[in-house]
Protein backbone atom coordinates (compact mmCIF):
# COMPACT_ATOMS: atom_id res chain seq x y z
CA UNK A 1 0.00 0.00 0.00
CA UNK A 2 2.79 2.40 -0.97
CA UNK A 3 1.77 6.04 -0.59
CA UNK A 4 -1.68 5.13 0.79
CA UNK A 5 -2.69 5.40 4.41
CA UNK A 6 -5.28 3.52 6.40
CA UNK A 7 -7.36 6.72 6.35
CA UNK A 8 -7.29 6.80 2.53
CA UNK A 9 -8.54 3.21 2.41
CA UNK A 10 -11.29 4.00 4.94
CA UNK A 11 -12.42 7.03 2.93
CA UNK A 12 -12.40 5.00 -0.28
CA UNK A 13 -14.53 2.31 1.38
CA UNK A 14 -16.98 4.98 2.58
CA UNK A 15 -17.19 6.24 -1.00
CA UNK A 16 -17.83 2.71 -2.32
CA UNK A 17 -20.57 2.26 0.30
CA UNK A 18 -22.21 5.55 -0.65
CA UNK A 19 -22.03 4.82 -4.39
CA UNK A 20 -23.37 1.28 -3.93
CA UNK A 21 -26.30 2.72 -1.98
CA UNK A 22 -26.93 5.31 -4.70
CA UNK A 23 -26.91 2.51 -7.30
CA UNK A 24 -29.23 0.39 -5.13
CA UNK A 25 -26.63 -2.38 -5.01
CA UNK A 26 -26.76 -3.60 -1.39
CA UNK A 27 -24.58 -6.69 -1.92
CA UNK A 28 -21.69 -4.42 -2.89
CA UNK A 29 -22.08 -2.58 0.42
CA UNK A 30 -22.15 -5.90 2.30
CA UNK A 31 -19.10 -7.36 0.54
CA UNK A 32 -16.92 -4.30 -0.10
CA UNK A 33 -14.85 -4.27 3.11
CA UNK A 34 -14.44 -8.04 3.31
CA UNK A 35 -13.44 -8.33 -0.35
CA UNK A 36 -11.11 -5.32 -0.10
CA UNK A 37 -9.22 -6.99 2.76
CA UNK A 38 -9.08 -10.26 0.82
CA UNK A 39 -7.95 -8.45 -2.34
CA UNK A 40 -5.12 -6.70 -0.49
CA UNK A 41 -3.96 -9.95 1.13
CA UNK A 42 -4.14 -11.88 -2.16
CA UNK A 43 -2.52 -9.12 -4.21
CA UNK A 44 -5.47 -8.65 -6.55
CA UNK A 45 -5.41 -5.95 -9.19
CA UNK A 46 -8.06 -3.23 -9.10
CA UNK A 47 -9.80 -4.95 -11.99
CA UNK A 48 -9.92 -8.28 -10.15
CA UNK A 49 -11.42 -6.62 -7.08
CA UNK A 50 -14.00 -4.77 -9.17
CA UNK A 51 -14.92 -7.96 -11.04
CA UNK A 52 -15.31 -9.90 -7.77
CA UNK A 53 -17.54 -7.30 -6.15
CA UNK A 54 -19.70 -6.85 -9.24
CA UNK A 55 -19.97 -10.62 -9.62
CA UNK A 56 -21.49 -10.85 -6.12
CA UNK A 57 -24.07 -8.20 -6.98
CA UNK A 58 -25.01 -9.73 -10.33
CA UNK A 59 -25.32 -13.24 -8.89
CA UNK A 60 -27.57 -12.02 -6.09
CA UNK A 61 -29.72 -10.00 -8.50
CA UNK A 62 -30.11 -12.95 -10.85
CA UNK A 63 -31.16 -15.23 -8.00
CA UNK A 64 -33.64 -12.81 -6.48
CA UNK A 65 -34.93 -11.74 -9.90
CA UNK A 66 -35.77 -15.32 -10.84
CA UNK A 67 -37.62 -15.76 -7.55
CA UNK A 68 -39.57 -12.53 -8.11
CA UNK A 69 -40.57 -13.60 -11.63
CA UNK A 70 -41.69 -17.02 -10.39
CA UNK A 71 -43.75 -15.34 -7.66
CA UNK A 72 -45.23 -12.93 -10.24
CA UNK A 73 -46.34 -15.90 -12.34
CA UNK A 74 -48.74 -16.82 -9.53
CA UNK A 75 -47.97 -20.54 -9.27
CA UNK A 76 -49.99 -22.18 -6.50
CA UNK A 77 -46.98 -24.25 -5.42
CA UNK A 78 -43.37 -24.68 -6.50
CA UNK A 79 -42.83 -28.00 -8.29
CA UNK A 80 -39.80 -29.59 -9.87
CA UNK A 81 -39.29 -32.32 -12.45
CA UNK A 82 -37.43 -34.34 -9.81
CA UNK A 83 -40.68 -34.51 -7.78
CA UNK A 84 -42.73 -35.88 -10.70
CA UNK A 85 -44.32 -39.27 -9.92
CA UNK A 86 -42.92 -41.43 -12.71
CA UNK A 87 -44.57 -44.57 -11.30
CA UNK A 88 -48.02 -43.02 -11.79
CA UNK A 89 -47.27 -41.92 -15.37
CA UNK A 90 -44.48 -44.06 -16.87
CA UNK A 91 -45.71 -43.59 -20.45
CA UNK A 92 -45.02 -39.84 -20.53
CA UNK A 93 -41.35 -39.97 -19.56
CA UNK A 94 -40.12 -38.94 -23.04
CA UNK A 95 -42.63 -36.08 -23.38
CA UNK A 96 -41.88 -34.75 -19.89
CA UNK A 97 -38.14 -34.98 -20.53
CA UNK A 98 -38.62 -32.98 -23.73
CA UNK A 99 -40.63 -30.38 -21.82
CA UNK A 100 -38.01 -30.27 -19.07
CA UNK A 101 -35.28 -29.48 -21.59
CA UNK A 102 -36.86 -26.05 -22.07
CA UNK A 103 -36.45 -26.17 -25.83
CA UNK A 104 -39.92 -24.70 -26.28
CA UNK A 105 -38.66 -21.51 -24.59
CA UNK A 106 -35.73 -20.93 -26.92
CA UNK A 107 -37.91 -21.73 -29.92
CA UNK A 108 -40.80 -19.56 -28.58
CA UNK A 109 -43.26 -22.44 -29.05
CA UNK A 110 -46.53 -22.96 -27.22
CA UNK A 111 -47.10 -26.09 -25.14
CA UNK A 112 -50.52 -27.70 -24.68
CA UNK A 113 -51.02 -30.31 -21.97
CA UNK A 114 -54.06 -32.57 -22.43
CA UNK A 115 -55.29 -35.48 -20.37
CA UNK A 116 -57.67 -36.62 -17.67
CA UNK A 117 -57.49 -35.31 -14.08
CA UNK A 118 -54.62 -36.55 -11.95
CA UNK A 119 -52.14 -37.22 -14.74
CA UNK A 120 -49.58 -34.54 -13.80
CA UNK A 121 -50.51 -31.74 -16.22
CA UNK A 122 -50.45 -29.01 -13.57
CA UNK A 123 -47.22 -30.38 -12.13
CA UNK A 124 -45.55 -30.24 -15.57
CA UNK A 125 -46.98 -26.78 -16.28
CA UNK A 126 -45.63 -25.41 -13.01
CA UNK A 127 -42.22 -26.98 -13.61
CA UNK A 128 -41.97 -25.64 -17.14
CA UNK A 129 -43.22 -22.22 -16.05
CA UNK A 130 -40.43 -22.02 -13.50
CA UNK A 131 -37.82 -22.62 -16.23
CA UNK A 132 -38.52 -19.30 -17.93
CA UNK A 133 -37.71 -17.03 -14.99
CA UNK A 134 -34.60 -18.99 -14.13
CA UNK A 135 -33.45 -18.48 -17.72
CA UNK A 136 -34.01 -14.70 -17.47
CA UNK A 137 -37.36 -14.77 -19.21
CA UNK A 138 -40.31 -12.75 -17.94
CA UNK A 139 -42.95 -15.20 -16.73
CA UNK A 140 -45.71 -12.80 -17.78
CA UNK A 141 -44.67 -12.83 -21.47
CA UNK A 142 -46.19 -15.59 -23.54
CA UNK A 143 -45.16 -16.84 -26.96
CA UNK A 144 -48.22 -15.16 -28.45
CA UNK A 145 -46.82 -11.75 -27.47
CA UNK A 146 -43.95 -12.02 -29.93
CA UNK A 147 -43.95 -11.47 -33.70
Image (cartoon, helix red, strand yellow):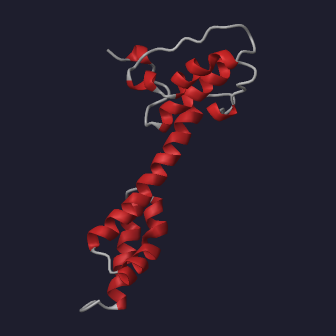
Please determine whether, in this image, residue 41 is positioned above or below residue 107. Answer: below
Give the image quarter of residue 120.
top right
Q: Position of residue 47 (x, y in %)?
A: 27, 68
Q: Who is closer to the viewer here, 15 or 28? A: 28
Q: Is residue 126 left or right of residue 135?
A: right
The vertical placement of 115 against 67, above or below, is above
Q: Quadrant of the N terminus?
A: bottom left
Residue 31 lies left or right of residue 44; in this view the side is right
Q: Name the residue: 42% across, 71% down.
A: 32
x and y percentages locating residue 123 in the rendered image: 66, 24
Depicted 9 relative to depicted 21: above or below: below
Left of 127 or right of it: where is 77?
right
Q: What residue do we see at 52% from left, 32% from top? A: 131
Residue drawn at (45%, 53%) of the image: 59
User: Residue lying farthest left?
Assistant: 3
How many circles with numbers are drawn on the protein?
A: 0
Q: Nearer the viewer, residue 37 or 85?
A: 85
Viewer-side residue, 45 vs 20: 45
Quarter of the picture containing the C terminus is top left
Residue ID at (33%, 81%): 43
Relative to 88, is 49 above or below?
below
Q: Quadrant of residue 125?
A: top right
Provide residue 77's location: percent of width, then percent of height. 69, 31
Amino acid sequence: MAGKTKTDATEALKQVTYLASALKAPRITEAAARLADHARDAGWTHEEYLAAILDREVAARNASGAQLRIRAAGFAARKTIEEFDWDAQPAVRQQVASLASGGFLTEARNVVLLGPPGTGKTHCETCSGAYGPSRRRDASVGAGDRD
